[in-house]
Amino acid sequence: MSDTVHIRMYNVGFGDCFLLTLPGNHTVLVDAGFHSQGKGAFSGDDLATQVVEDVKAIKGEPRIDVVIATHRHQDHVYAFNSELWDELDVGEVWLPWLEDRTNEKATRLWKKHQQFAMNLAAAVPTFGLDPESQSSVQFMLWNAGIDHAPLPGFEAWSNAGALNRLHEGFARRDRARPRFLPETDAFPESFDCPVLPGVRIHVLGPPRDPKLIEELDPEADGETYRALALRGAAAGAIPDPAASGPPFSEDWRVPDTEQTPFPLKPDEVERMEGLAKSADAVFAAEKVDGMINSTSLVLVLEVGKARLLLPGDAEWGTWKRILDDDGARTLLRSSSFFKVGHHGSHNATSKTLVEKVLPKGIPAMISTQQGEGKYRNNIPLTDLLSALTKRDIKFVRSDRGSDTLPNGFAPGVGLKWIDLEIPC
């Protein structure tokens, strides 16, 4: 029996797909998504084909012991549309508690969220957005499964189709119904799983309180690595300037009856209005995007002395709860691997987590693809990467398999993945 954990990060671009091999050749698949524009080495059936082949090589049979979908964003689940997954036997499927279709609280939350998103999608053509903002908003709506324009070659695929396979698909299951985590109000919630002998699972998110799920903004708490708080409204509400009163006293204000001494030209007014609409649309799309991220599973898999921290794309509401709890912080302090959240963005990896909680010198993986457009630009954040380096956290990026990799990491065939071995 191997005394190591093997982690394979597939190069799917701006998305996640990880295959874990645990002692006894037990396998865990964490997400299977890919980028909307096909960046990375895989898309669709290609990713499913590779994972199935890899699992057969590991186990000698088409079986994954646990399939985990951290949250419903398409860059984490879209490849589950492939019919090739139905070749697999599966032990269990794990999903966030919000994916339990019999849970009334979850159903209400999704209805509220989807109505907001669909209204935004319907309104986007009226905004007259600049091309960069248009690209950002369209990506976020696509990723949320709201903008239903199909990708070329994937006309039969959808967010709902991927979720249906996770709920009901695969050739055979040991446990017919998914586990919807956390299953209780215990925090952290810990359990053993019959298909993963010798593994202790700790569930740190998502919260079962919808208010925490909708708390998205780390900037108010000084927990973001983004240098300038350019989008404080990304948490949902765009600030109302009238709420805090005018910035100057009456003596300094020009009466409304007086003509503006330097009037704007019509084209300047049109440009200013266009910028405001672009900002409003991007903020609203970020709210759609961020709320789904906050439904992410946050798991610690304890395998011998190895502790694998797998936070999906969890945002600040989840992390704030984790960092405020002594038991949860203790788990994180003993982490021996870190999957960097949300591709290295500003709102999924707090300063406290990196600088005060995670152990120095551990390995980390970032599934990412620096892209164009406001939403993906500067991801992964340079300040975050610098903070990881300062902490001596040895990280690799899925899109940089050609780099000289730290000890323990190895590039895959054709730079399609990066492997890591961790002693346990």
Image: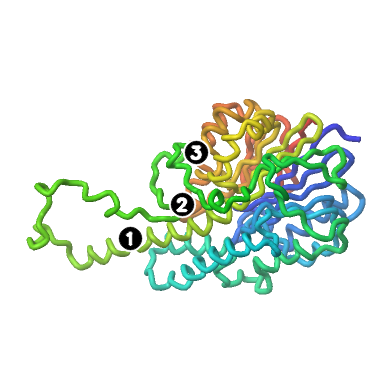
Is residue 417 positioned above or below 262 on the image? Answer: above
Among the two numbered marks 1 and 2 on one chain, the one whose residue lies closer to the N terminus: 2
Which amino acid type corresponds to the residue marked 3 in the rendered image?
Thr
Between 27 and 193, the residue placed more toward the observer is 193
Where is residue 2? Give x, y as percent: 88, 34
Please tell me which residue is depicted at 49% across the width and 69% down the height of the picture: 121
Between 292 and 420, the residue placed more toward the observer is 292
As drawn, is 66 to the left or to the right of 359?
A: right
Is residue 305 positioned above or below 138 on the image? Answer: above
Please tell me which residue is depicted at 53% across the width and 51% down the height of the picture: 211
Q: Nearer the viewer, mark 1 or mark 3?
A: 1
Among the two numbered marks 1 and 3 on one chain, the one whose residue lies closer to the N terminus: 1
Q: Secondary structure at mark 3?
A: helix
Please tell me which residue is depicted at 66% across the width and 44% down the height of the picture: 298
Among the two numbered marks 2 and 3 on one chain, the one whose residue lies closer to the N terminus: 2
Task: Identify residue for label 2.
Answer: 235
Between 213 and 283, the residue placed more toward the observer is 213
Task: Identify residue for label 3.
Answer: 382
Residue 132: tell me if it is visible.
Answer: no
The mark found on residue 276 in the picture is: 1
* Quadrant where the C terminus is found in the figure: top right
